[in-house]
Image (cartoon, rainbow, N blue to C red):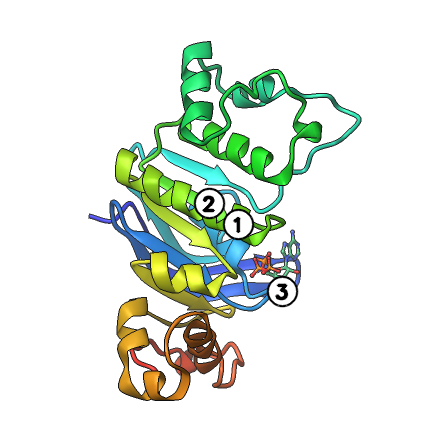
């Protein structure tokens, strides 16, 4: 049983068709990563899946009563509007001090309750935002480029934290990431998006394809090769050209 399922999903924003013909599923405990070039509709896909943006065709089905936690790409904080971490954690649903403290502790941000959001470092802020997402006791966490702006160490630590949370809470994770080494090492499935689903499959199968290894080896460079491969065909948003496969050619 999928937590979220989309069939033939299309989204129009203004005059632009941002997504079309997208089929998508995510099962409990799965880690699925969405990759794709800038402007390819990754954030829009996440927002459409949670019902934050209207869809123009197709359907999205969420499991009944689905609890989800969403970490947006960029939290817009107005520096002129003071807001403590505590207050942020209580929006829109009030949580007990014990619960907020536990959530902050879980994300490695213990004791930040009284701090102003605007004064937190990028890494601290991401942990507070993640803590807020955890307060919903989510069955699925959606993370839109959660390590943007973090340095490499900070980013690696954040992804480890996410994996630990998946293990502890048993929630599924759907994330957008540009960090392809993470995509290769930490995802159960990868979806490559460019207005439509270009291809999808397990990163392991792709990484172990002999042609792929012979050309690019493994590790980050291999991941880049996967990325390039998947974008080597023409993208004209013609869905007859959609294809999915699990091998590098
Ligand atoms: N509110 C909006 N109104 C009109 N167009 C929009 C709106 N939001 C996004 N778009 C357009 O939709 C397209 C997809 O945007 P989206 O943010 O989903 O891409 P993305 O793959 O997440 O990009 P990035 O990697 O740069 O974050 C872009 O061309 C963007 O300009």
Mark 1 and mark 3: Cα distance apart in space: 37 Å
Is the CB atom of the residue marked by disc 3 within 8 angstroms of ligand 1's nearest atom?
yes
Q: Given contact means CB atoms under 8 Å apart, are the residues at marks 1 and 3 in contact?
A: no
Q: Given contact means CB atoms under 8 Å apart, are the residues at marks 2 and 3 in contact?
A: no
Q: Is residue 54 visible?
A: no
Task: Answer left or right for 194 relative to 203.
Answer: right
Q: Position of residue 216 (x, y in %)?
A: 41, 83
At 55% from the left edge and 54% from the top edge, which residue is drawn? 152
N-terminal label among 2 and 3: 3
At 67% from the left edge and 22% from the top edge, which residue is drawn? 116
Q: Residue furthest right?
A: 80
Residue 201 vertical position relative to residue 134 in the rendered view, above or below: below
Q: Is residue 167 visible?
A: yes
Residue 232 vertical position relative to residue 33 in the rendered view, above or below: below
Q: Position of residue 163 (x, y in %)?
A: 35, 45
Crowding at mark 1 (Cα within 10 Å: few <14, some 14-19, many 20+): few
Is the CB atom of the residue marked by disc 1 within 8 angstroms of ligand 1's nearest atom?
no
Q: State the residue position of label 2.
A: 157
Q: Nearer the viewer, mark 2 or mark 3?
A: 2
Q: Which mark is residue 16?
A: 3
Mark 2 and mark 3: Cα distance apart in space: 37 Å
Q: Position of residue 59 (x, y in %)?
A: 37, 54
Mark 1 and mark 2: Cα distance apart in space: 6 Å
Local SS, label 3: strand
In which quadrant of this rendering is ligand 1 seen? Answer: bottom right
Crowding at mark 2 (Cα within 10 Å: few <14, some 14-19, many 20+): some
Q: Nearer the viewer, mark 1 or mark 3?
A: 1
Residue 143 vertical position relative to residue 129 in the rendered view, above or below: below
Q: Given contact means CB atoms under 8 Å apart, are the residues at marks 1 and 2 in contact?
A: yes
Q: Nearer the viewer, residue 193 or 8?
A: 193
Q: State the residue position of label 1.
A: 153
Q: Nearer the viewer, residue 39 or 118?
A: 118
């Amino acid at each position: 049983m999928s937590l979220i399922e989309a069939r033939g999903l299309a989204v129009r924003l203004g005059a632009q068709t941002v997504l079309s013909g997208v089929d998508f599923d995510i099962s409990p405990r799965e880690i699925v990563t969405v990759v794709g070039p800038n402007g390819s509709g990754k954030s829009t896909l996440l927002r459409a899946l949670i019902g934050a943006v209207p869809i123009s065709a197709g359907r999205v089905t969420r499991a009944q009563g689905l609890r989800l936690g969403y970490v947006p790409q960029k939290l817009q904080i107005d520096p002129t509007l003071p807001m403590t971490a505590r207050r942020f954690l209580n929006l829109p649903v009030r949580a007990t001090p014990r619960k907020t403290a536990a959530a902050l502790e879980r994300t490695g941000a213990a004791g930040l309750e009284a701090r102003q959001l605007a004064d937190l470092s990028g890494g601290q802020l991401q942990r507070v935002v993640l803590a807020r997402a955890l307060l919903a006791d989510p069955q699925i966490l959606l993370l839109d480029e959660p390590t943007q702006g973090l340095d490499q160490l900070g980013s690696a630590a954040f992804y480890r934290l996410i994996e630990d949370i998946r293990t502890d809470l048993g929630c599924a994770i759907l994330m957008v990431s540009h960090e392809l080494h993470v995509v290769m090492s930490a995802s159960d499935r990868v979806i490559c998006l460019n207005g439509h689903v270009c291809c999808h499959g397990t990163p392991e199968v792709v990484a172990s394809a002999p042609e792929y290894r012979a050309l690019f080896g493994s590790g980050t460079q291999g991941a880049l090769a996967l990325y390039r491969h998947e974008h080597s065909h023409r993208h004209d948003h013609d869905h007859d050209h959609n294809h999915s496969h699990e091998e590098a050619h």
